Image (cartoon, rainbow, N blue to C red):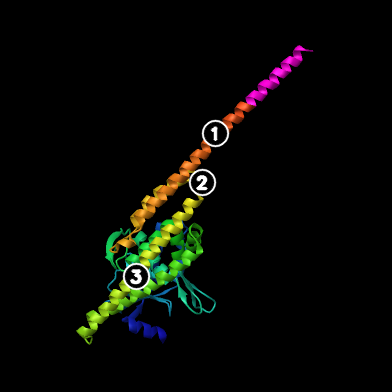
Amino acid sequence: MRAKKILKKMGISNPEKLDFKQKESLVKSVSQKIADRFETYGIKYENIYMKLINTDMYLSDIKSGTPKANYIYKNSSLYIDRSIDISENNEDILRECICKVQEVRNKKNKIHKLGLCRFNESKIAGVAFNEAGMQYVLSLLLDKKEEKVNAYGVMINSISIQYPALTNIIRQMTFIAGENYLVQSIINSTDDFKKSFIDKCNETSYYSIMKNTDLMYEAKKRITNIDRKILFDRKVKEESKAKLREKVNKYSKSIRFSYTKIQKELCQCYFNKKIGIANTIDKLEFIREEISSYKKLIAISCEEEDNFFDKYSLDCYYKIERKIEKINKENSMLMSDKKGFSKAIIKIKKLFTSSNAEYEDNK
């Protein structure tokens, strides 16, 4: 009964179950698409296939404004709009199939994990991480290119118009933790991404960023709901619309504040730690190149005080140069000591040789 209410609320009607041949063809196509792209990351065709082939799938009528494919967790079923050609790798279908694949349930059949999202009795954590990670994985599957998006007063390089700030944050975290770990964690619901990020940065930053991105996600949802109310609710008067727009502005500012704060924390916790432990010139030179590459991910804010990276990168370059100079100096002293030691050994050998010669002469 609960599932029927959810379907009605979402505008999904007249479901007709796919026959096995149709479903098998769809499952094979999706499984092959994902496995081919991520085979080197340890994603297996058979694992995806087995999870999807055991999922009920329906062709349905889905109202305008609702995604054309929806996986309903309540009854573990996938609903696809009749207008979609299921023989093609449609983005909505790919996304909802991944939602099914990443689902992990406990013994009570309650959802325990969804990619980077974790459920417990009192709360859900990591919703934003999982949403942004899903968008990132889809961009890899569909070869999407990054575009500059003006959002919340910030120019962001992003692969998502819907979640530009969140996907940019996950992109920066992926630069740090590794793309292979993100893909594994999104599709197989592992902790690889979290462990790698914590190893490269620290645990406090991971959970702090998770908490703040979840707040950003909630603010984004509220903006979307208010925008819909302003545009489509005829009962809302102009005076009320002005107040609603003020709320949108408030939420937008909160997203920009959280985003710029997270962006700053990310690069500082990563590069400060990495420069601190680097002990060779090659490693330090590599970090210098990384900083240059990382700059391409950094967004530019309309608030000048938020634009910190240029100054921060210069500080990092200075620290790198100082460490390189120190290493060169230590190497120079070591070489000098080695030369002095070698000369001392030669002198001792000469003394020892001449002493032996005198001893032979006096025999």
User: Does the magenta-highlighted stretch encompass residue 350?
Assistant: yes
Q: Main secondary structure of the magenta part?
A: helix
Residue at mark 3:
255
Q: Which mark is residue 25?
A: none
Distance between the Cα atoms at labels 3 and 2? 38 Å
Q: Is residue 33 visible?
A: no
Q: SS class of the residue under badge 1?
A: helix
Residue at mark 1:
335
Residue at position x 69%, y 19% from top?
A: 353
The magenta-colored residue range is 345-363
Q: Residues within 10 Å of mark 3 (few under 14, many from 20)?
A: many
Are the residues flagged by discs 2 and 1 in contact, CB closer than 8 Å? Answer: no
What amino acid does circle 1 point to?
Answer: Met
Residue 348: x and y in percent read 67, 25
Residue nearer the viewer, 331 or 152: 331
Residue 117: x and y in percent read 45, 70
Residue at position x 36%, y 64% from top?
A: 260
First reached walking from the N terminus: tag 3 or tag 2:
3
Q: Residues within 10 Å of mark 1 (few under 14, many from 20)?
A: few
